[in-house]
Image (spheres, rainbow, N blue to C red):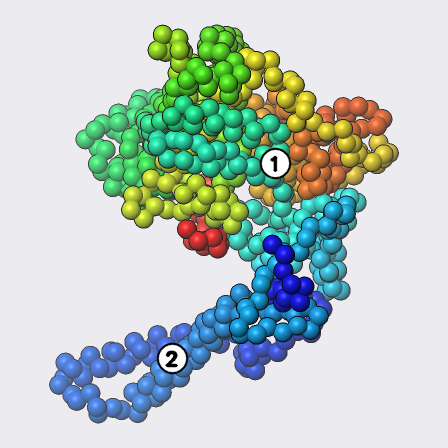
Amino acid sequence: MDTDASAPILKPYHRHHHDHHNSPTPVKASDALPLPLYLTNGLFFGLFFSVAYFLLHRWREKIRNSTPLHIITFPEIVGIVCLAASIIYLLGFFGIGFVQSCISRGSHDSWDVEEDNGGGCSPEEPPTCTLAPISRAKVVAPTIQEPFLSGDDDEVIKGVVSGTIPSYSLESKLGDCKRAAAIRREALQRMTGRSMEGLPLEGFDYESILGQCCEMPVGFVQIPVGIAGPLLLNGKEYMVPMATTEGCLVASTNRGCKAIYASGGASSVLLKDAMTRAPVVRFGTAKRAAELKFFVEDPANFDTLSVAFNRSSRFGRLQNIKCTVAGKNLYMRFGCSTGDAMGMNMVSKGVQNVLDYLQPDFPDMEIIGISGNYCSDKKPAAVNWIEGRGKSVVCEAIINEEVVKKVLKTNIDTLVELNMLKNLTGSAMAGALGGFNAHASNIVSAVFIATGQDPAQNVESSHCITMMESVNDGKDLHISVTMPSIEVGTVGGGTQLASQSACLNLLGVKGASKDSPGSNSRLLASIVAGSVLAGELSLMSAIAAGQLVRSHMKYNRSSKDASPPRHRLAIVIKTIKAFLFILKTPPASVLLLKAAVFIATGQDPAQNVESSHCITMMESVNDGKDLHISVTMPSIEVGTVGGGTQLASQSACLNLLGVKGASKDSPGSNSRLLASLVAGSVLAGELSLMSAIAAGQLVRSHMKYNRSSKDVSKIPS
């Protein structure tokens, strides 16, 4: 609608925060104290509690001796004065911060009226908000500016480069997470000689990930989020967020949702809900290991062990313990419910409590590790496929014949035959473990990344068998997916970040359920299974109709080549420097192993399933003085051109490693070098994690660095 040109335009008013590098350091009230602030606080806290204890003790004696309380001695007068002084100081110290926070919050959403051509706003004619027309001129992408770094920061950067200042300690030393990330980023560029332009730094709350999501950040990777749906599941509609860089994936899943919706919707059933952890313990003989197995599996002892386990959490409740013996080693697989959390930390704490309880009765029990891989976490394993882990869900739908023909462009008999020969027979011929499906991992990875789940757990969460058969005299198609190991949560970890929390809020499963603890995470698992059902239906139809190659050639490739010419020797030298820097950093930095490296460099995270196949070998050499460690990874599927590698932030990470784009001199060498870097990062991660388990530090470190009570999301429920 057209409006008068003289109408005032409303523009948001924002408080301008001047960078602390550009302005002089403000004078603080604490500068007037004769002692440092932390010593002053400690003094008054100690004074408050000691004087309060002294006065209460004296008054108790007066009551016992029937002495009037209003008769006070000189020490009591001094005590009352000191108590009042400490109360006044503490109220002032904490009260000022509270009042200032209330005042600052009140001005964030204020608006200023900016008048065009000097026009004014009269009370009778309220201003009209207008949208500026979109220019048809070519849009130029804004240049990403590096944050301004002062002279003091330059000294810190030099210290990080030289190694005198540990990079991982910048947040604690500087007290400013964003500044620490900027300094670390600049130090990394100087060490590797490569620009990180394209990897965003601005626009992210680094305070929200401190101590829980990621260490040593230098920026964040942007992954587009698409919406598939509505998915009609159990009578309700859901719009499913999917974070992916693979073309056709969202469109294909959306088509499956359309077919399901037109046929009356899908239904799902939760079969089981139990997160697992399996420690390994060792005895002197196999007989002693068997004795503990019989003790733990005896139903008469279950209640006692449950009491020890359940002390770890309000929501963690032990469900079962299953044991297996290998020689004199015993593996105990604990299964427990974990409320709305994914629950790995919760079950680990409970297992530690049970081991501590068993130790006095089995003093010869040697705890080798809190995790013995019988769980089994982030690895394809038959125990998860058979017993389940996390949420076990089956989802089904009946698709009408008319919908199969008009929406899916194929027929029922062709789909049933293709499913038998591809998903069942073909997977069996390949020796697949839980992989009796077309592309369940694609949908699981996309939903996991969008909703803040652990993308590495896509490995077992993608275990799925897809079944199809004709029903109602061949007029309809019955399709089902059975997924025994969907590991999801709606609290903790990445679910607390603002964007991931928004996606959970879209699905109606944000945070913990107040009325029925655990119902939000169970609903999320059902939505994941329903989305996989839609994706399987659409992809199988595309293959049956011969549309797969044509659609991918149309929507999932690009002719752009983002690789600038460069000298090959310089690539090798600088990449070695980058690799050495990665090996010096602790695990879980921006470029980590497996799924983390895949996401950072624009690979397909769904291919983490087979790319994580790995055997780690360790042995002592040189007469036991040194350790030889190796990782063998037969299926690393990576590339440096096409797909998500062309996005700006992912391209910046590839550039940091010296493998951006296609190699001009030796085609294929960049992708091979990237695969070697992935294997090297896995080697570093395996060495560190195995050392943590051997030293008994796994639970303690996760409790310290991988949890938070903060909810940083500002999105209303």
Alpha carbon distance from label 2 to label 1: 52 Å
Quadrant (top left, top right, bottom left, bottom right) of the N terminus: bottom right
The residue under label 1 is: 599
Kindly indicate the quadrant of the structure image that contains residue 296: top left
Residue situated in front as seen by the camera: 490 or 615: 490
Q: Position of residue 557 (x, y in %)?
A: 70, 27
Please rate how many residues cluster around mark 1, counting C-alpha atoms within 10 Å: few if below 14, some from 14 to 19, many from 20: many
- Residue shown at 35%/32% (left/top)? 235
Q: Position of residue 595 (x, y in %)?
A: 57, 33
Q: Position of residue 554 (x, y in %)?
A: 68, 24
**Sequence-first disc among 2 and 1:** 2
- Residue shown at 56%/82% (left/top)? 32
Please rate how many residues cluster around mark 2, counting C-alpha atoms within 10 Å: few if below 14, some from 14 to 19, many from 20: some
Kindly indicate the quadrant of the structure image that contains residue 517: top left
- Residue shown at 53%/16% (left/top)? 409
User: Which element carries disc 2, helix, strand or loop?
Assistant: helix
65 left or right of 434 in image: left
Question: Which amino acid, mark 1?
Answer: Ile
The residue under label 2 is: 87
Placement of 579 over or under 533, stated as above or below? below
Placement of 79 over or under 708, stated as above or below? below
- Residue shown at 54%/68% (left/top)? 126
Q: Position of residue 563 (x, y in %)?
A: 79, 34
